[in-house]
Amino acid sequence: MAEKTRYSDEELQEFKEIILEKLAKAKTDYDVLKAAISGSDGNDIADTSPTFKVLEEGASVLSKEEAGRLAQRQAKFISHLEAALVRIENKTYGVCRATGKLIAKERLKAVPHATLSIEAKEGLDL
């Protein structure tokens, strides 16, 4: 029996549904982070007493910096998921870019934007 070179249309549809779910959640999380950065969530220091204002401003800056880093990571994750959807449409999804073999279903379910098989990834880490 010949080795499969790509996933079936049914399997691709299953992966697409997983990716769309993760994408919706990722976009929601990204919007929350953007609101935290811009201060549009209404939790700012304007309504606190002057005694705590200096401490809260420092904490606020740190919090916004952290939210900024998280927002950048979330934006990158969203772009990876969107690229995975393009690969599904092209029917190249799930094919390891290093070995050309299929990436294990279990890996794709856990990391749906993966482009490397475990074997290839471990080889790169050495």
Image (cartoon, rainbow, N blue to C red):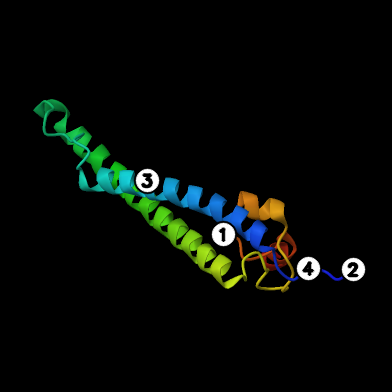
State left or right for residue 50 relative to residue 81: left
The image position of residue 70, as x and y in percent, is 39, 50
What amino acid is at disc 3? Answer: Thr
Q: Going from the N terminus, do you reach mark 4 or mark 1 first?
A: 4
Point out which mark residue 63 bears: none
User: Is there a contact, CB below 8 Å, between mark 2 and mark 1?
Assistant: no
The image position of residue 121, as x and y in percent, is 68, 63
Label 1: which secondary element = loop
Q: In which quadrant is the C terminus drawn?
A: bottom right
Residue 58, picture quadrant: top left
- The Cα–Cα distance between marks 3 and 4, rounded to whole angstroms, is 36 Å
Q: Going from the N terminus, do you reach mark 3 or mark 4 first?
A: 4
User: What's the residue at 38%, 45% (across, down)?
Assistant: 29
The image position of residue 76, as x and y in percent, is 44, 60
Q: Going from the N terminus, do you reach mark 3 or mark 2 first?
A: 2
Point out which mark residue 28 bears: 3
Point out which mark residue 113 bears: 1
What amino acid is at disc 1? Answer: His
Label 2: which secondary element = loop
- The Cα–Cα distance between marks 3 and 1, rounded to whole angstroms, is 18 Å
